[in-house]
Amino acid sequence: MIKHERTNVYDFNFHLVWVTKYRKQVFTTDKRVADMKAILKGIAKRNSIEISSMEVMPDHIHMMISFAPKFTPSSIVKAFKGGSAKQWFIQYPETKQQLWEGHLWSPSFFMSTLGDVSKEVVSKYIKSQLERYNGGRPRR
């Protein structure tokens, strides 16, 4: 869905995945899954991030998100991972023992862009713009 802000219009959609440290299965009950979803939804709301889809798996998170272009993907990941770990350990301090008193999340993540059109379609569209501007004549 196209979003309009004062200075820009955008349609950014990303698939974001990250895993628990050592791939430990932390989110193993319905309550733990629901609590992590609530934490992530709160972080999204505070940071103007739209969550289109989310699943909390025993050892990783999948999200489809959208955010304004003024934010960097790495800052969004930092907000989710850092904020959620802090809140999680407040609610579930015993899980630190499961992770050897360490971190909730692995330092890595996966993020890819999503779109309604392929790279080929966008490339053709961009190339056609000069021809349209030049009255149908390609650049020499």
Image: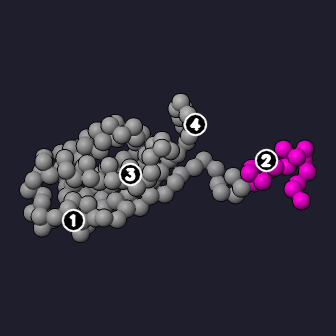
Q: Earlier in the sequence, mark 2 or mark 3?
A: 3
Looking at the rendered structure, the kind of residue marked 1 is Lys
Q: Are marks 2 and 1 in contact (CB under 8 Å)?
A: no
Asked if the residue at tag 4 contacts the one at tag 2, i.e. Cβ–Cβ closer than 8 Å, the answer is no
Residue bearing mark 1 = 24
Towards the viewer: 140 or 111: 140
Q: Which amino acid type corresponds to the residue marked 4 in the rendered image?
A: Val
Which residue, given by chain and number where applicable, does mark 3 sit on?
A: 75
Q: Crowding at label 1, few (<14), some or many (≥20) Cα neighbours within 10 Å?
A: some
Which element is circle 1 on? loop
Q: Which residue is painted at 53% across and 30% down in the image?
A: 6
Q: Disc 2 or disc 3, which is closer to the eye?
A: 3
SS of the residue at dot 2?
Answer: helix
Q: Residue at x 69, y 52 (%)?
A: 122
- Disc 2/disc 1 C-alpha distance (Å): 51 Å
User: Which three-letter amino acid code belongs to the residue tagged 3?
Assistant: Ser
Q: Could one spot residue 64 in this view of the protein?
A: yes
In the picture shown, does residue 21 fall above or below 4?
Answer: below
**Rendering coords of residue 77 (x, y %):** 36, 53
Q: Residue at x 11, y 64 (%)?
A: 101
- For the residues labelled 1 and 4, the Cα–Cα distance comes to 40 Å
The residue mark sitting in front, 1 or 3, is 3
Give the residues in magenta: 124-140
**Circle 2: residue type:** Gln
Of the two numbered discs 2 and 1 in the rendering, the one whose residue sits closer to the viewer: 2
Residue 129, numbered label: 2
Question: Which numbered disc, 2 or 4, marks the residue that appears first in the sequence?
Answer: 4
Q: CA distance from mark 2 to mark 4?
A: 19 Å
Q: Which residue is mark 4?
A: 9
